[in-house]
Image (spheres, grey):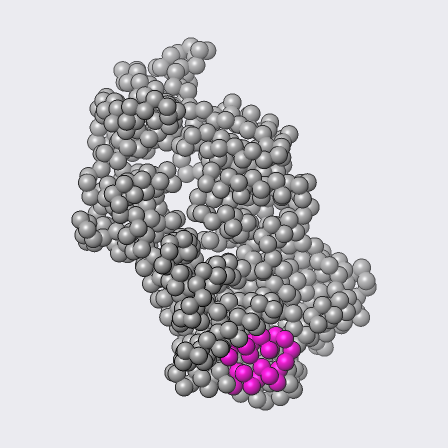
Amino acid sequence: MAGDWRAQSGEPAARPREPEPGRLPAEVTGFVGRQRELAELAGLLAGARLVTVTGPGGVGKSRLALRAAARAAGAFPDGTWLVELAPVQDPLLLGRAVLEALRLTDGTARPPLDLLTERLSGRCTLLVLDGCEHLVQACAELADALLRALPSLRVLTTSRAALRASGEHLLTLAPLPVDPRPSDPGGPSDPGGLPDAVRLFAERARAVLPSFALTEADAEAVSLLCRRLDGLPLAVELAAGRLRALSVEQITARLDDRFRLLTGGSRTALPRHRALRTTIGWSHELCTVQERLLWARLSVFAGSFDLEAAEYVCAGDGLEAEDVLDLLDELVGKSVVLGEDSAFGVRFRLLDTLRDYGGQWLRAAGQEQRLLRRHRDWYLGVATWGEVEWFGPRQAETAERTELAHPNLRAALEFCLAEPGEEQIALLLAGTLWFYWVGCGHLGEGRHWLDRALALDREPTEARAKALWVTGHLATLQGDLETARPALEECRRQALDTGDDRALAYAVHRQGSAALIGDEPDRAAELFEEALWHYRTIGELNSNVVLAMVELGLAYLFQGDPESGELWFGQARELCEEHGEQWAYAYVLYAMAYAHWMDGAVRAARALAREGLRLNHLFHDLLGIALAIDLLALLETEPGAPGDLGGARVLQGAAHRIWGAVGLPFLGSRSFFGPHQECAERARAGLTAQEYERCYQAGARLDLDAAVSRALGGSGPAGGPEPGSGPCSVPSAPTPAPARNS
């Protein structure tokens, strides 16, 4: 049914969604040496399509790859993108991690590989996959598939092991030189002739001890220390960090002891691996017993965390909660933990190598499972509190906090799915995060976790019922009614069998949503009325209840009863304004704008639609953004409107691009498709065929921020054409969207 009306719409195929030019992170410490390796890597990137920088942990693979990528950025006009893979533990999420790094947050049910192939088509892009060693097979398969499908793409990876993919070229990175270069005339006293490892030590030493100066007298001691560390950059930097408490000679003496202690007499491990482990172990030994205990327990965190999370997860059994702050401060001072500023205060993060080391000690102490459960409990609490806070004035803050917690929420979900007996918690956690999956543009990932959890445990519990209606809701928003309807019906039957009134209300509500999307407004209205009765009976009031009112009003509009529709929109608006709700309020404004358009009140409709779009953009709600932009495009074509047909067609192209990241355009619904079709017909009647096509393609080139700015009436690069450039002109390289914390 949906295919028929789309085929009849006569829409030209928009160009695949294109990522805006990428940004590499700025270097925060000086880059020392590696000129020969940089030149070699530049040559490889110029002639090979897949290049992997290999070497032991801590040798500087990431720094070299990023420096080389930054230098080569001019050869890739469509962007140089960094994908950090350390937080990604599930190979099935690799493709989604790449989509997110390219700022192409996607909620469709299509495989990420298909989406990446579509959206990078024809683009001259460099993709940097950093830290592939724990996902070697998945990275090899992804790189091979992308390179075969995209002739203009090049891939640079870093990994402790080669990917062994077809066409892969390797650059094996050795430790920094620890002996003076033969051609150096001045020897150690000549700064230009110092070995790179010594220069690195001196630079990092000055960062922690500004009075440090490398003299001829102590240059030999530093050279000896660097030689003992095999010139590994991470080891050298950690050693330099100890100068606040020890002299160079003392560091060297302590390192001697740690070599014997931590290698355990093994002669089979690679020397540079022994050196790195020794350095980390020595840094570990310099910590107090409680600092070591906290280091080990912090290893359960993925990505960043705040003080409150550390206090809850790590306290107990020898570590008091009130001591965690001071211990964290000490670990930051010893370069074990990084402190990072955020909108909500300081957050912390363990370097990956140090996190792995701490994890080994945690497992050796037999505490890993207990700490993982405490970690799971904390982030279940984060999700639960987020669900409560979602309906209220702190909604935008809740969205941002949940975004920051995203890597740890993933880790908690992965633990629940992998640990026998945790399946019900997995269902509960994945279902509780409905507000994040729906409201912040993560429909596809939400489906991923929910599908896995539902497949593991079929016991008819409240947690399963919630996961079922959330799955049905996400699938409906993707236009996937074939999945949505059975899930919602199973939830309804289970709720009736078990007496779960809350699940019954949500199941009936989302069955109404499926009926509305399926172009059955009469049936949808009946279900929404029933759902609202259930909500009132159980005393439920949240964003879902508001949306039920909005959807009921839309069902009446689609039946030709605008008066009844506007009554429900008014009730929904009052609730949002009373409780400070903004996300559902955006949909209230969209529905009211739709009603005003039907009534001929174009100016009021435009104001409402723009305010709704602004709120949708605040939450990165792609569905709401696409609906609002398409309605604003139609309003540009209304008689007496200040817009123009070409500008309306540009907005239609922009909306089409966004729909590609949601699912089926217009949710596969003829009712929601109506305004778009009417706008297209008006534009087709008033533009030449060439203008009609050119304007649409111009809109399809706009990135998300530029599209929103244009729809809101902005000007300049993101908001519209430059003076004299024509109604369909948009910049060829729009301003990139800010990076999302995801």
**Is 467 left or right of 370, judged from the image as shown?**
right
Q: Position of residue 294 (x, y in %)?
A: 25, 45
**Is 561 left or right of 1, judged from the image as shown?**
left
Which residues lie in the magenta part? 508-529
Front-most of residues 594 and 284: 284
The residue at the point 60 percent across, 50 percent down is 113
The residue at the point 37 percent across, 23 percent down is 268
Query: Magenta segment: does it hold 511?
Result: yes
Front-most of residues 705 and 562: 562
**Is 2 left or right of 705, judged from the image as shown?**
right
Res. 283 image quadrant: top left
Q: Position of residue 224 (x, y in %)?
A: 31, 18
Front-most of residues 408 and 24: 408
Res. 713 image quadrant: bottom right
Assign the N terminus to one quadrant of the image. Answer: bottom right
Q: Is 116 placed above or below 36 here?
A: below
Q: Position of residue 575 (x, y in %)?
A: 44, 81
The residue at the point 33 percent across, 63 percent down is 381
User: Does any portion of residue 251 appear in the rendered image?
Assistant: no
